Image (cartoon, grey):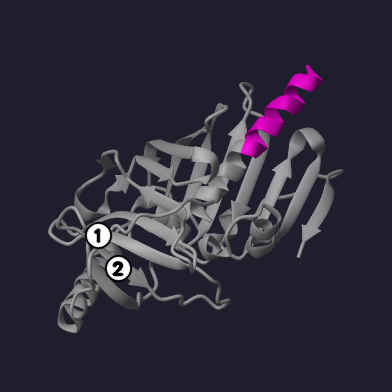
Amino acid sequence: MPCKKKRRTGKTILIFNCLLLCILCSSCAQKRWTDALSEEENSAMEQLVTAMQEREQQCSQNFDADMQVFWKSPVTSRAVEGYLQLLAPSSMKFVVSNPLGQPVFAFTGDGNKFQILQPTQQMHIRGSVRSLAIRSKLPLVMTRGDWFAYISSRLPAHKLTILETAPDSENNTVWLRLADTSRQKTDGLIYLHLDPQQEKVLGYLFLDNAGETLADISYPGKREGSTYCAVQTEIRVDKLPWGSEIRIKLENIANTVQLKEQDFPLPVPAGFTTQIWP
């Protein structure tokens, strides 16, 4: 039995690393947009985005849900289920429990710092998200974003500076290149995919400075909730290394409990060994 628990925990850690890859890499990207719009058209798009952000601020800025994560590569596939809590802009907690309801893995982070608990190994890891990305060989451009926005299919909470607007090469949607407003500047580009007619976020695209794709986030499923406050129930991540892909499904989404920042840090049980990743 102990060996099975260790294998289960190892699988959970592997799958959760893939989840971090999703929200926090690479293949050649075909150009998905045409020539940039004029300054006047770009200004109009900025006004639309500002109006959408103001509207979304009226929505609940937190929710919890049951989450399933599926990871598939050409050689293997895995799945894990857990309980997710999110608070805008980037506070996140994900807990995996065994059939008896005992936690076997827990992660929490706020976009800057993170904690991991591995109860079966009595291990506690904490440090910076930047350090976690470097150790996991993840692109730093993905650590500077808004986790709540990426998972809920909404716009980031902070004011967006749009550097360029370009029509999609196949339909009437648009791609907006966003400026890096983070404290720690990193290489890489972030694009927002938007449907201006329906005023809906369609996805996020992360590129390196050479134009190669680091991750492509889209929302193929239905939204749960009413009007513009609805939360996406399915998140899809493509263009990962070696043909891998991630699917996230959310169920039993609820925003009736008002989460606070102090709800996210993990208490460390006595006897756990702590590792610090500066």
The answer to which of marks 2 and 1 sits earlier in the sequence is 2
Front position in the image: 138 or 26 = 26
Amino acid under label 1?
Answer: Leu
Relative side of 249 to 26, left or right: left
- x, y percentage for residue 56? 28, 62
Amino acid under label 2?
Answer: Leu
Q: Identify the residue at image location x=61%, y=65%.
A: 112
- x, y percentage for residue 233? 34, 40
Q: Is residue 140 above or below residue 22?
A: below
Q: Identify the residue at image location x=67%, y=52%.
A: 136
Relative side of 111 to 28, left or right: right
Q: Identify the residue at image location x=51%, y=52%.
A: 26
- x, y percentage for residue 236? 39, 42
From which residue to which does the magenta span run? 1-14
- Quadrant in the rendering for residue 98: top right
Q: Is residue 238 above or below residue 97?
A: below
Q: Name the residue under label 2.
A: 176
* Residue 6 belongs to the span the image colors magenta: yes
- Quadrant in the rendering for residue 234: top left
Q: Distance between the residues labelled 2 and 1?
A: 8 Å
* Residue 261 belongs to the span the image colors magenta: no
Position of the C terminus, as image quadrant, is: bottom right
Q: Identify the residue at image location x=71%, y=33%.
A: 10
